[in-house]
């Protein structure tokens, strides 16, 4: 990996190298004020076509279903766990080295959650030898302790399970981990804290087999329900949701079928696609060339759900949904496992009445990945994924829609102390960088992840409370 952090030397990307003068500084600040004003007034939807792929590992050993992100080190950047590895987000433009640590047991890590209310990160993992809670021994996750919390085995394909999500199933306390599986049905794990330390319980909520699960409050009654769907049957495959009865520990939740699809369901996601305040269900199928569809929840609970097509492609074994362009509605992302191996965004238009396709990348075979979260804390959703047929890889696609960004070079001292960086990441619309805290040598990166011009050192000398930093050369 290259060290992408470069000292800034002048106020323009193409300007001759020179020290800033008073006149130059005035020009910089005038431009900044104009830019900030324009952006604040316009507030346009974010581009869906500006992505940078960062290959964060190409030497992974073993296959994984698990691929989950969360800030395990408290620095504001979400880290990734997948298989038996923890990857520490290097921060800022995320193109530094993602420090990898191998967990002490052979597991598939599937969830990031706070287990014991301390400052160290916690991970939930499954595997062929039981279920585990992994606890970081330090703030930076360089060493981990494993706790075997149950004898239940999740061992599909000798790896783990393909259905997992996290939600507040039992109201209050720590969040629960929900699993779909081929041998245990649908279960959740819940933890309580007592004098003996964390105590785990596995609760069975359905005997159904589902490859994917997704949590959401489907009936708007305030508790979190679980969505899934059939596979490995000869008939049409039912898509359903399981109703949380609101009682901790209750088993055998009531199943509500919303419709069916012709092939095995693979991914499922609860999301309000048409923005009417009711959760809908997005699903993909595991077969050759298939459709992606969403089931619209009716206004009255007794009416039928309506199935709508979003698009089609080759083995969408990756799918997620979220507002990727920041315009207030839910967009969908899918990844193909075969052929073109495209990663596609389906931009939601007019409350789910149609979808426009955007390409994030192609030629990368993803599997139960293409997951959306804001990895770099700059206000837009990034993408991360593992692969099944090329399991050595783990990728991140940085969303560059909110560029430029401001950051400062990560120092070994920062890293050693586990300190957050200032000002981490900033965006044109939301970030307010306190200039008094801006260290010498801070920089900005452009859409391609390269460092461009701008005199951050000079900016730090002003008396303004804070401002977004942008160089005149890039202010078009
Ligand atoms: Ca509910
Ligand atoms: Ca809806
Ligand atoms: Ca949107
Ligand atoms: Ca982001």
Image (tube, rainbow, N blue to C red):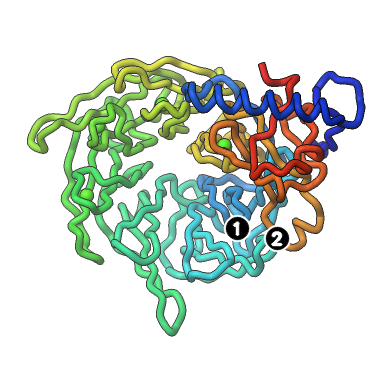
Snapshot quadrant of residue 189: bottom left
Few, some or many C-alpha atoms within 10 Å of disc 2 (few <14, some 14-19, many ≥20)? some
Find residue 80 and report its horizontal and vertical position in percent.
Answer: 59, 48
Work out whether residue 296 or residue 457 is closer to the camera in this orientation and state it: 457
Q: Residue furthest left?
A: 302
Left or right of residue 406: residue 134: left
User: What residue appears at the point 23 percent right and 36 percent down from the top-left corner?
Assistant: 278
The kind of secondary structure element at disc 2 is loop
Q: Percent x, y for residue 82?
A: 57, 49
Residue ID for mark 2? 418
Give the number of the disc on residue 74. Answer: 1
Do callouts 1 and 2 mark residues in contact (Cβ within 8 Å)? yes
Residue 241 vs residue 386: left or right?
A: left
Q: Is residue 223 above or below residue 267?
A: below
Q: Is mark 2 within 8 Å of ligand 4?
A: no
Please tell me which of labels 1 and 2 falls first in the chain. Answer: 1
Q: Could you tell me residue 237's position as x and y percent?
A: 25, 33
Seen in the picture, residue 17 relative to 204 is either above or below; the reply is above
Quadrant in which the N terminus is drawn: top right
| Marks 1/2: CA–CA distance | 8 Å
- Residue displayed at 26% across by 37% down: 279
Q: Quadrant of the C terminus?
A: top right
Q: Residue at x 68, y 65 (%)?
A: 143
- Lateral position of residue 183 relative to residue 439, left or right: left
For residue 202, the mark is: none
Please, is residue 217 above or below residue 34 in the view? below
Mark yes or no: residue 338 visible. no
- Of residues 236 and 403, the one nearer the viewer is 403
Q: Secondary structure at mark 1?
A: loop
Horizontal side of 344 relative to 51 (left or right) equals: left
């Amino acid at each position: 990996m290259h060290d992408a952090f470069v000292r800034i030397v002048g106020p323009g990307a193409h300007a001759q190298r020179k020290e800033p003068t008073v006149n130059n500084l005035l020009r910089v600040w005038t431009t900044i004020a104009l830019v900030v004003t324009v952006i604040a007034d316009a507030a346009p939807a974010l581009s869906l076509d500006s992505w940078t792929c960062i290959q964060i590992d190409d030497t992974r050993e073993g296959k994984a279903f698990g691929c989950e992100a969360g800030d395990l080190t408290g620095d504001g950047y979400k880290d990734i766990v997948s298989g038996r590895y923890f990857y520490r987000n290097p921060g800022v433009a995320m193109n530094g080295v993602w420090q990898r640590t191998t967990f002490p047991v052979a597991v598939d890590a599937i969830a990031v959650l706070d287990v014991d209310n301390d400052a160290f990160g916690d991970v939930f993992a499954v595997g062929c030898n039981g279920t585990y809670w992994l606890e970081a021994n330090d703030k930076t996750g360089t060493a981990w302790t494993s706790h075997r919390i149950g004898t239940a085995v999740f061992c599909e394909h000798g790896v783990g399970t393909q259905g997992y999500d996290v939600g507040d199933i039992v109201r209050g306390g720590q969040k629960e981990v929900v699993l779909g599986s081929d041998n245990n049905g649908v279960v959740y794990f819940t933890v309580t804290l007592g004098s003996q330390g964390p105590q785990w319980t596995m609760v069975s909520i359905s005997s159904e087999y589902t490859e994917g699960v997704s949590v959401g409050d489907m009936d708007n009654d305030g508790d979190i329900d679980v969505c899934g769907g059939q596979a490995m049957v000869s008939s049409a495959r039912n898509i359903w949701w399981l109703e949380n009865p609101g009682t901790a520990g209750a088993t055998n939740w009531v199943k509500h079928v919303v419709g069916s699809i012709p092939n095995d369901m693979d991914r499922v996601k609860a999301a309000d696609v048409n923005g009417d305040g009711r959760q809908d269900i997005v699903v993909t199928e595991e077969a050759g060339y298939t459709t992606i569809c969403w089931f619209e929840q009716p206004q009255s609970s007794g009416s039928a759900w309506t199935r709508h097509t979003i698009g089609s492609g080759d083995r969408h074994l990756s799918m997620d949904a979220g507002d990727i362009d920041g315009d207030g509605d839910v967009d969908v992302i899918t990844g193909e496992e075969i052929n073109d191996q495209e990663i596609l965004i389906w931009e939601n238009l007019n409350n789910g009445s149609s979808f426009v396709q955007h390409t994030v990348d192609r030629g990368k075979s993803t599997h139960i990945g293409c997951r959306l979260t804001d990895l770099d804390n700059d206000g837009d959703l990034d993408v991360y994924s593992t692969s099944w047929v090329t399991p050595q890889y783990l990728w991140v696609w940085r969303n560059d829609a909110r560029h430029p960004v401001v950051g400062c070079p990560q120092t070994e001292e920062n890293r050693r102390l586990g300190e957050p960086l200032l000002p981490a990441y900033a965006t044109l619309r939301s970030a307010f960088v306190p200039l008094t805290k801006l260290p010498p040598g801070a920089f900005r990166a452009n859409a391609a992840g390269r460092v461009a011009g701008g005199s951050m050192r000079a900016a730090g000398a002003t008396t303004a409370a804070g401002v977004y930093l942008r160089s005149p050369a890039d202010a078009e």
